Image: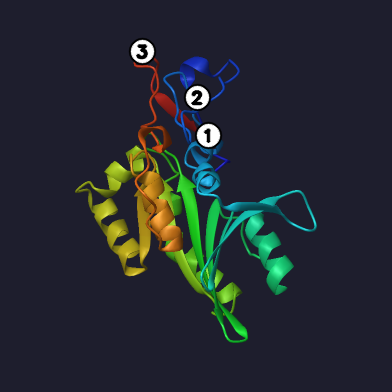
Amino acid sequence: MKDKEIKESSLSSKTPKTIKNKGTGAGGANTVLNGGAYEQITSIEKLLEKKGWEKKSFETNTDYYFVKIDGNKKLVYVKQNGLKYYMEQFYSESAIRKPDEAFLTITKNENKDLINIKILEKKYQSKDGSVDVKLWAGPSLKREYEFYYDEKYQIDYAFSLSKFLIDKLKSNQLKWIILNKILKENNIQTFDGTDENYFDQIYKWGFNISPEKLNNTEQIKPIKTKSKSKPVEITV
């Protein structure tokens, strides 16, 4: 996603303005969006901090993960290289990719840990372009994780998408109808990153836990740009 920089053409020659966060994060009217910005404002980390999850550093580097014990289950949140570091440190495994976010539910079962890994990839697009092509790769990437871990772990896969892509998936265009069917056949869910209940949905999906209702300062707000700005362009 980060190789697709998205920016307002009228500001292309200027340094992007800093994103102003409200609560867990929201793009203000002056926000210049790119893949990294979308990942930031849809990060669930502030919710985990508020709910008292423990933030720990890995033994071999300065990266970190979040963890919570829930009965006989250990719930773990990682991002990017964090999946690789976590699997290396605790299971002598690794990771084939660097997911935007990953949610692990580890259940103790006698001498064996039963592990469910949920992969969340984030895609931002604001007009017709090539980012949506990556959605078609979802089933293959999910299967790749299953093969990589020799089908020892349950793998679930989902996308966090911008409003433009969500609207496309809801359209009557044949291309998107077919994609919807393919995603559903492979149990790949899609989440609207601008939905006011986004964090509730991700938390529930990621850990099969429904948190208490978030107040308005913790809900993500729709991503907007100035109404007088030129159309957002995608530079490939």
Residue 37 shows which numbered tag? 1
Can residue 93 be seen from the camera position used here? Answer: no
Identity, as a three-letter code, of the amino acid under mark 1:
Ala
State the residue position of label 2: 32
Dots 1 and 3: beta carbons under 8 Å?
A: no
Give the SS element for disc 2: loop
Q: Earlier in the sequence, mark 2 or mark 3?
A: 2
Q: Nearer the viewer, mark 1 or mark 3?
A: 1
Dots 1 and 2: beta carbons under 8 Å?
A: yes
Q: Earlier in the sequence, mark 1 or mark 3?
A: 1
With respect to residue 210, does 217 lie above or below? above
Can residue 97 be seen from the camera position used here? Answer: yes
Q: x and y percent of residue 1 in the render?
A: 53, 44
With respect to residue 94, does 216 lie above or below? above
Q: CA distance from mark 2 to mark 3?
A: 14 Å
With respect to residue 15, does 188 lie above or below? below
Residue 228 shows which numbered tag? 3
Give the SS element for disc 3: loop
- Crowding at dot 2, Cα within 10 Å, few <14 / some 14-19 / many 20+, comes out as many
Q: x and y percent of residue 202 in the render?
A: 41, 52
Q: x and y percent of residue 105 in the render?
A: 52, 67
Which of 42/147 is in front?
A: 42
Which residue corresponds to the image point at 29% horizontal and 58% vertical from the top-left?
180
Give the SS element for disc 1: helix
Identity, as a three-letter code, of the amino acid under mark 2:
Val
Residue 18 shows which numbered tag? none
**As drawn, which residue projects farthest toward the right?**
60
Which of 26/56 is in front?
A: 56
Q: CA distance from mark 1 to mark 2?
A: 8 Å
